[in-house]
Amino acid sequence: MKFIRPFLKTILVLFSIILIACISLYLTGNAHLIKAVRSTYLVGKTGPSINDYLKFENRIIAKGNPIPWNLSNQQLKIKDSLITKAKNWETVAFLVSQKNKIIYEKYWDSYSKESLTNSFSMAKTFTGLAIGACIQDGLIKSVNDPVALYLDEFNTPDKKNISIKDLLTMSSGIDFGESYGDPFGFMAKAYYGREIYQLTLSKPQQFKPGKQWKYQGGNTLVLSFIVEKVSGKTLSEYFSEKFWKPIGASEDALWTYAEEDGKERAYCCFYSNARDFAKIGQFLLDSAKINGKSIVDSTFYNQMIKPVNIPDENGKTIDYYGYQIWLGQYKNKSFYYARGILGQYIVVIPELEIVFVRLGHKRDKTRNVEVPKDLYLYFDMVFDLINNK
């Protein structure tokens, strides 16, 4: 009995400390840290993972009638040395299609063609496409429209001149913050927090719109708020209607959302499989058309895949980013692509009529680069594949 009392006292003290800590976090606006710790360190992780949908509320992006991929009859192979390098990056899926036909598909570590994994920032491209669809539908007149025309919160002296185009090109001038290492920063609160709308719209203006490129997920969130406002639908509902059903996705997708205000994390957190992600790539390759019909405004699409040519904070002109999509060249081949922080890629190579998708757990850690170094490996895998056809 004499041993039980000290033990109970210790438990009570620990419980009190935890309770006080939780209350303090809540009162200081940092309650998101409770979920962050529970979702990472307590399960052996140090940050977000590709399977995080299991830890969050999700909204369904409903599929329509699935349209199966055409599959190549050829048994194409990639050099073992390249496959080994891909495995070292903890790749879980690699798919290549050419001329609307899957010519290579491989999965690792119990993942399959049905496995849902996190898009991370590839979702920015999806949200950008939704804006293009709103223009096509006549819900938005032009990318040059001021955001204040759609969101009253932007009708302020410092934000009234920000246009939709400024958001698309990551040049709004709003100081959202994009640090992934700051547990108290905007990205941590947006990812793990219960409320996104007011968090996003409360951020101050840092510099004049259209003058400086600064990659920030907050811009994408504001775009999603516009989509919801003009469509009268959630972002997931609108994306399902305009894209997911028309492309013939094989499975429902998921988009995580903040529990209190119901807003999707539009800058990330779209969960699907390699085949359906590749369908989005094919849609982009087909000039954002389905059976010849434009889903996205054609002028918008053409501008989407052109460089913004806006200087960054160091004065360097950004020629590798468009409207919420990345641009590049490798071995004399131009390409555009959606990308995520752990090496999620949907890549379109128009000249070769190729789309490829890579999903996995790791990416080159160098930040603020035109093209992550690991992406070149996946290009080499594709080129090795088609050179041996």
Image (cartoon, rainbow, N blue to C red):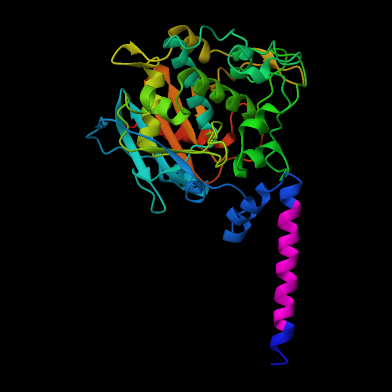
Check residue 17 for magenta coloring.
yes
| Quarter residue 246 falls in | top left
Q: Is residue 359 in view from this perspective? A: yes
Q: In this view, does 45 lie above or below 196?
A: below
Q: Residue at x 41, y 20 (%)?
A: 284
Magenta segment main secondary structure: helix
Q: What residue is at 69 percent from the left and 19 percent from the top?
A: 213
Locate residue 342, reporting x and y percent. 55, 41
Q: In this view, does 333 lie above or below 12?
A: above
| Left or right, residue 210 beside residue 344 | right
331 and 239: which is toward the camera: 239
Q: Examine the rendering and report whether any part of residue 387 can be seen.
A: no
In percent of the image, x 75 and y 72: which residue is there?
A: 13
Screen quadrant of the N terminus = bottom right
Q: Quadrant of residue 239?
A: top left
Residue 363 on image: x %, y %: 57, 41
Q: Residue 155 is drawn in which quadrant?
A: top right
Highlighted magenta segment, given as a residue range: 7-24
Q: In this view, does 36 lie above or below 172?
A: below
Is residue 169 on the magenta stretch? no
- Residue extending farthest to the left is 73
Query: Which quarter of the image is occupied by the C terminus?
Result: top left
Residue 217 at x, y percent in the picture: 62, 30
